[in-house]
Image (spheres, rainbow, N blue to C red):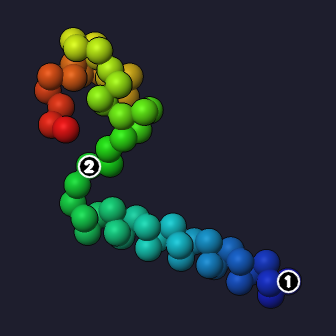
Amino acid sequence: MIEILLGIIVLFASFALLAIGVIANNKPITGSCGGLANLEDGASCEICGRTTDKCSN
């Protein structure tokens, strides 16, 4: 039972440290869905719905 509890604690600690790293980096996450560079000119992003000309790559 202690192994399962320890595993869950390690898992949640890992997620917390990753989240703190993303927040501390203060940059938006990029590269999802193959990256915005793969979209055609004028196409809308499937994630945010904006056109790609408003994105800062």
Circle nearer the N terminus (1, 2): 1
Disc number placed over residue 18 in the picture, else none: none
Q: Secondary structure at mark 1?
A: loop
Residue, x 21% and y 23% (percent of image)?
Answer: 52
For the N terminus, the image quarter is: bottom right
Q: Secondary structure at mark 2?
A: loop
| Up-down relation of residue 32 to residue 54 (above or below) | below
Residue, x 19% and y 38% (percent of image)?
Answer: 57
Position of residue 29 measured from the top left corner of the image (x, y, whole percent):
32, 48
Query: Does the image show residue 11?
Result: yes
Query: Toward which corner of the image does residue 10 lie, by quadrant?
Result: bottom right
Query: Toward which corner of the image does residue 34 lie, by quadrant?
Result: top left
Position of residue 40 measured from the top left corner of the image (x, y, whole percent):
29, 15
Q: Nearer the viewer, mark 1 or mark 2?
A: 2
Position of residue 8 measured from the top left corner of the image (x, y, whole percent):
68, 74
Disc number placed over residue 1 in the picture, else none: 1
Residue reaching furthest right? 1
Residue type at mark 1 is Met
Residue, x 25% and y 65% (percent of image)?
Answer: 25
Label 1, label 2: how far apart the Cα atoms are:
39 Å
Query: Does the image show residue 48?
Result: no
Residue reaching furthest bottom? 2
Residues at marks 1 and 2 touching, judged by CB atoms closer than 8 Å: no
Classify residue 8 as left or right of residue 27. Answer: right
Residue type at mark 2 is Pro
Query: In this figure, which residue is indicated by the disc labeled 2?
Result: 28
Classify residue 48 as left or right of residue 26. Answer: right
Residue, x 26% and y 69% (percent of image)?
Answer: 24
Residue count near mark 2 (Cα–Cα under 10 Å), binned few <14, some 14–19, many ≥20: few
In terms of depth relative to the viewer, which is nearer, 49 or 37? 37
| Up-down relation of residue 21 to residue 7 (above or below) | above
| Up-down relation of residue 22 to residue 2 (above or below) | above
